[in-house]
Amino acid sequence: MQQKFLKLGALALLQIVIVGNLQVLPANAIYGVALPFLYLVAVLGFFLPCTLMVAELATTRPQTGGAYIWCEQAFGPKLGFFTVCILWISNLLWYPSIYSLIAANVAYLFDPSLAQNKMFILSFSILLFWLFTGLNCLGIKFSSKTSEVCSLVGIILPMLLIIMGGLVWLTAGKPLGISLSKTAFFPEISHFTDVGLLIAIVISLFGIELTAVHAGEVVNPRRDYPWSLLISGVVIVVLLLLSELAIALIIPASQLSVMTGLLDAVMVLFQSLHLAYLVVPVLFLILIGNIGSIAAWMLGSTRGMYVACERNRVIGFLQKVNHNQAPVGVLIVEAIIFTLISGVFLILPQVTDSFWLLLALASQVTLIYYIILFISTIKLRTLPVQAQGFIIPGGKPTLWILMCLGALTSFFALCVGFIPPNSLEKSGVFSFHMIMGAGLAVTLFLPFLLLFFKEKK
């Protein structure tokens, strides 16, 4: 019998550590005081529909497997496998970006010049990924406890410090990195020359559904899931928005780096306030937050892939679990693939170019995954529920409006993601489009290939 141990507090903190990714702060801070308007659009168009979707499906269909179970019940096991498989692959494409940020964080603790050193970023990322692979083999109990600590110490605390630092900066009369004029609060289309970065707002809110993969371990899903989503959703949006505004106040958009903008802001803030002794501790807290976030993402996506492989009998090795019920087969395979994908850092001229390319490609695939989820939710409303739980109020019309809004927002972000950033040199634009096209083709083809070999066997 499956042991249930996840409660309200653990669920909320797990959701915060998954969605509250610190690495998106500098990318979003570029928008300055237009952030409240942009977040309003992103929350209404994507995050609210997604959160309500998870609240309904995780409580009315509380089985271990999350997105796979939902898509399987809506459209059959093949689409369920396809959906979870592309999410797993998108995470493999995203992992090098977040690990490069962790490497940059470590570099700042010792030698900031290493943040743009390709070999240091590559070797450190690969070493750390294999270390996390070993730690995730300890299972969901270990991961949930780690996430609780990392969420409090490495996500919430650093964001609160950055927010307070921004307030001190503002009230102390320091030079502001943004304009506070009325026109600046609403973005102008002419300012979106680097329109590809718009996708960063939606990316900030990815992942709230990942905790549903552990639904079988939740003590009282009917009560705990809706409340945990409400608590974590409010905390996430408020902390992300205020932290990004604080960074925008301190560092002008023209000086913000996607790779090191957060670290730069911490250093400038505390040194200017004559609190230089806090720089290293805060950078260390950010490191802990990044580690907790990636550990939670890894176990969530690998468990979903394991459930999909087990129920479809795809590749025996991917169905292996250890005595901690950790999907060791999937974990090992993804570590090998990660090592190969990380080679992109040696292809493009700048570390930041590699970071943006992998992030954009991963986001494209994840948006396709979300479109399928929103459509599946509409279909599932027509089928019998498996347990009494939260139902999105307003009946089918409200459900259709919310899910279609989420799907359309995801589709728009998908289209925007094909526009390369202006920071990319002209010589790299061709490589950007080639890798994006090839990456999407391979990602969408691989699930069918795995199912083909399964059927032939």
Image (spheres, rainbow, N blue to C red):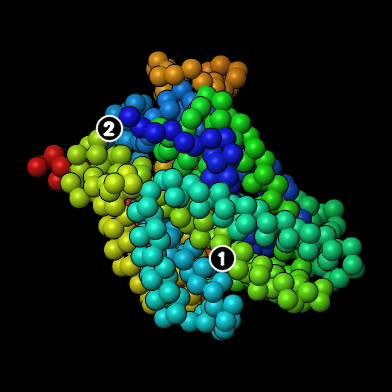
- Say what secondary structure mark 1 lies in: helix
Residue 403 appears in the figure: no
- Mark number for residue 287? 1
Residue drawn at x 22%, y 37% is 312
Residue drawn at x 54%, y 22% is 390
Residue drawn at x 63%, y 59% is 25
- Mark number for residue 259? none
Q: Is residue 405 left or right of residue 72?
A: right
Quadrant of image for the N terminus: top left
- Say what secondary structure mark 2 lies in: helix
Tell me if residue 233 comes above or below residue 143 in the rendering.
above
Amino acid at pointer 1? Leu
Q: Which residue is mark 2?
A: 77
Give the image location of residue 457, x and y in percent: 9, 42
Amino acid at pointer 2? Pro
Q: Dot 2 surroundings within 10 Å: few (below 14), some, or many (20 or more)? A: some
Marks 2 and 1: which is nearer the front? 1
Give the image location of residue 97, x and y in percent: 47, 64
Distance between the alpha carbons at the discs numbered 2 and 1: 39 Å
Q: Nearer the viewer, residue 64 or 47?
A: 64
Q: Nearer the viewer, residue 139 or 46?
A: 139
Tell me if residue 40 comes above or below residue 394 in the rendering.
below
